[in-house]
Image: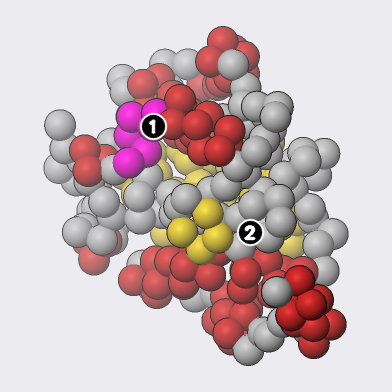
């Protein structure tokens, strides 16, 4: 299977910069492996939705779009590694939201309970630049299941439809936005904690700093401008552990 022949017709420069779904880790995501990572991280309660609950949410949310093309907005790794076969891609802007580092990882992926990590989510703000993928009506059910398994495995996001601007006209797109009621989301996180979590968080998937760098490099490769990301990385690289924390470690040592 491959992308539709004219999937990149609006932006031929994106061809070759978006990973083939057949090569994506997320195409057939093993949730049992995620469970093992969480258990190794010491999580006594598994927060993941059951397969039945997750699928019920997907079907209810997407019911109005049954038998129709489905647009999905991407703002992070979904941009260059969507893991789905799409019929069309457009550069897009989502008004009313911004790319925000407010997803706190204590589950062993890129952080732990002792040293939380941080990842990106969509939070309220002026606007967010990204990509919009159109899933063709005939394959939207299968492809949306792939995305839903990845984005909605546990309470973290809310799946909403919102108007997205593109140079080829507006579209109504599925967006996964931060759920402020979810334990993993902290929309009030301070800048100091953002920097510290990104500087120190690490887990089975790598460090939180690596995640930030991946976002920056992915945006740069796709020619998506977000100067806030570079400013955040500069602060992360300039971060140093406070003297009192170093003293406490020395005493323990």
Residue 7 falls within the magenta-colored stretch: no
Task: Say if 26 sits above or below 100 in the image.
Answer: above
Coordinates of residue 241 in the picture (x, y in percent): 72, 82
- Residue 162 image point, x, y percent: 63, 42
Return the residue nearer the eye: 179 or 199.
199
Look at 56% across and 10% down and name the residue there: 52
Q: Secondary structure at mark 1?
A: loop
Closer to us: 217 or 114 = 114
Q: Which mark is residue 117?
A: 2
Q: Is residue 167 visible?
A: no
| Contact between labelled residues 1 and 2, with CB atoms less than 8 Å apart | no
Q: Provide the secondary structure element on which disc 2 rests.
A: strand
Quarter where residue 2 is shown: top left
Q: Is residue 154 above or below residue 168?
A: above
In-image side of 229 versus 44 (left or right)? left
Question: Quadrant of the rendered structure where residue 1 is?
Answer: top left
Q: Examine the rendered structure and indicate whether residue 126 appears above or below residue 63.
A: below
Q: Nearer the viewer, mark 2 or mark 1?
A: 2
Q: Residue at x 26, y 61 (%)?
A: 17
Question: Residue 133: where, in percent of width, then height?
Answer: 40, 44
Taking the spot 68% from the left edge, 66% from the top edge, the residue there is 197
- Mark 2: give few (<14), some (14-19) or many (20+) Cα within 10 Å: many
Instruction: Tell me which numbered mark, 2 or 1, is placed earlier along the sequence.
Output: 1
Q: Main secondary structure of the magenta part?
A: loop
In the rendered view, does 95 fall on the left or right side of 213? right
87 with respect to 45 (left or right): left
Cα–Cα gap, marks 2 and 1:
21 Å
- Provide the residue designation for mark 1: 29
Q: From where the camera sits, is residue 3 visible? A: yes
Residue 8 image point, x, y percent: 24, 52
Residue drawn 81% across the image and 62% down it:
189
Which portion, as a residue range, is magenta? Answer: 25-30
């Amino acid at each position: 299977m491959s992308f539709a022949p004219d999937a990149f017709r609006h932006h031929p420069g994106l061809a070759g910069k978006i990973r083939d779904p057949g090569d994506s880790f997320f195409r057939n995501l093993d949730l049992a492996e995620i469970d093992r990572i969480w258990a190794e991280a010491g999580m006594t309660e598994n927060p993941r939705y059951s397969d039945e609950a997750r699928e019920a949410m997907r079907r209810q949310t997407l019911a109005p779009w049954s038998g129709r093309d489905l647009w999905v907005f991407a703002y992070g790794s979904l941009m260059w590694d969507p893991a789905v076969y799409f019929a069309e891609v457009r550069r897009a802007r989502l008004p009313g939201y911004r790319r925000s580092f407010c997803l706190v990882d204590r589950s062993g992926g890129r952080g732990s309970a002792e040293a939380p990590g941080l990842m990106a989510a969509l939070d309220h703000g002026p606007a967010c630049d990204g990509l919009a993928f159109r899933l063709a009506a005939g394959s939207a059910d299968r492809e949306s299941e792939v995305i839903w398994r990845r984005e909605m495995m546990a309470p973290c996001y809310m799946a909403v439809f919102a108007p997205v601007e593109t140079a080829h006209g507006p579209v109504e797109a599925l967006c996964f936005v931060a759920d402020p009621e979810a334990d993993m989301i902290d929309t009030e996180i301070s800048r100091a904690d953002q920097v510290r979590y990104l500087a120190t968080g690490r887990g089975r998937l790598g460090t939180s700093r690596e995640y930030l760098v991946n976002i920056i490099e992915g945006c740069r490769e796709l020619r998506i401008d977000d100067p806030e990301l570079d400013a955040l990385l500069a602060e992360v690289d300039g971060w140093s552990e406070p003297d009192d924390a170093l003293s406490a470690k020395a005493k323990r040592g």
